[in-house]
Image (cartoon, grey):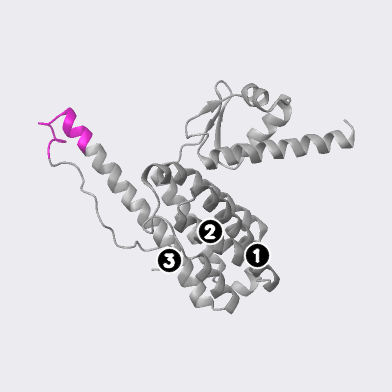
Amino acid sequence: MSPSAGVTRSTLRQQIADALRDEVLAGRLPPGREFTVKQIAEQYGVSATPVREALFDLSAQGLLASDQHRGFQVREFTVADYRAMAEARALVVEGLFRNPAERVAVRPEGLASIRRRAAEAVRAAKGGDLDVLIGYDLRFWRELGQFVLNLYIADFLTRLRVQAWVFAVHRLRRDGMDENVLWFGHEELVEAIARGDREQVHAEMCSYYAHALAWADRLEAREAEGDGEQNAEGNADGPAGPGSAVPPQSPQPPESPGHCA
């Protein structure tokens, strides 16, 4: 293989992976959707090799599940998965705060771009434009992650944020978006970083994770209520009869992992 051929295939592989990731994040490839390398190759009019590589890349990022007999499937994340994502990110960020001078290096020249991402994310959230919100939110957190000196941690946090959006996008399209679901603190966080106000940055991050976990609580309560109603309809005289459904709660903001409580 010539060097130019290798570069072309690598670029095509990344383009396909990016396109499919966008399809998943936009909700056009719903959770559970199955497809094969051949189907994707025919859709994009390319050979199977870069498609297979792109799909394995997305599988490694946790967005797809693969089966040698059935091909690939868009990963279905549960509420428990989402809660675990939020807790994992909170614990990692909490660890960064233990000695931020050694783990984080804020570059003032990078803040202007992050401010723009923050403003656009908040504007899209308040305007109900989910596609724009996802794009700017991911850029916001990815650019903030560039301040983290450990690139493995930065990559881990970015992947979890992408997975969280894969979980959220279908629920938000179904249920709508409001301040009880979406977090609007992007601008406050970046300004606290710009001031070097470590305590306020910590407080904003704790608020962010508490908000995510509170949404998980409400989703779990709704699922429990739905399961209870189905059981009541199926067996009115059994242990899951009338009155057994768990009523929806109005949870207090949960304690976040680490020292956020």
Find disc 3 in the rendering and name its residue.
207
Disc with the residue nearer the chain's start (2 vs 1): 1
Q: Residue at x 44, y 48 (%)?
A: 82
Q: Residue drawn 65% across and 64% down?
A: 113
Q: Earlier in the sequence, mark 2 or mark 3?
A: 2
Measuring from the top left, give residue 219's x and y in whole percent.
33, 48
Q: Is residue 161 visible?
A: no
Residue that label 1 marks: 113
Please, what secondary structure does the residue beneath circle 2 have? Answer: helix
- Please give the range of residues in magenta: 229-242
Residue farthest along the left direction in this orientation? 237
Amino acid type at mark 1: Ser
180 to 64, vertically: above or below: below
Tell me residue 51's x, y (percent): 68, 30
Q: CA distance from mark 2 to mark 1?
A: 12 Å
Left or right of residue 11, residue 229 in this image: left
Determine crowd level at label 3: few under 14, some 14-19, many 20+ residues with C-alpha closer than 10 A. Answer: many
Q: Is residue 22 visible?
A: yes
Residue 217, percent from left and from top: 33, 52
Q: Position of residue 65 (x, y in %)?
A: 54, 33
Q: Is residue 239 above or below residue 200?
A: above
- Tell me the amino acid under the disc marked 2: Ala
Is residue 257 one of those drawn in magenta? Answer: no
Looking at the rendered structure, the kind of residue marked 3 is Ser
Find disc 2 in the rendering and name its residue.
121
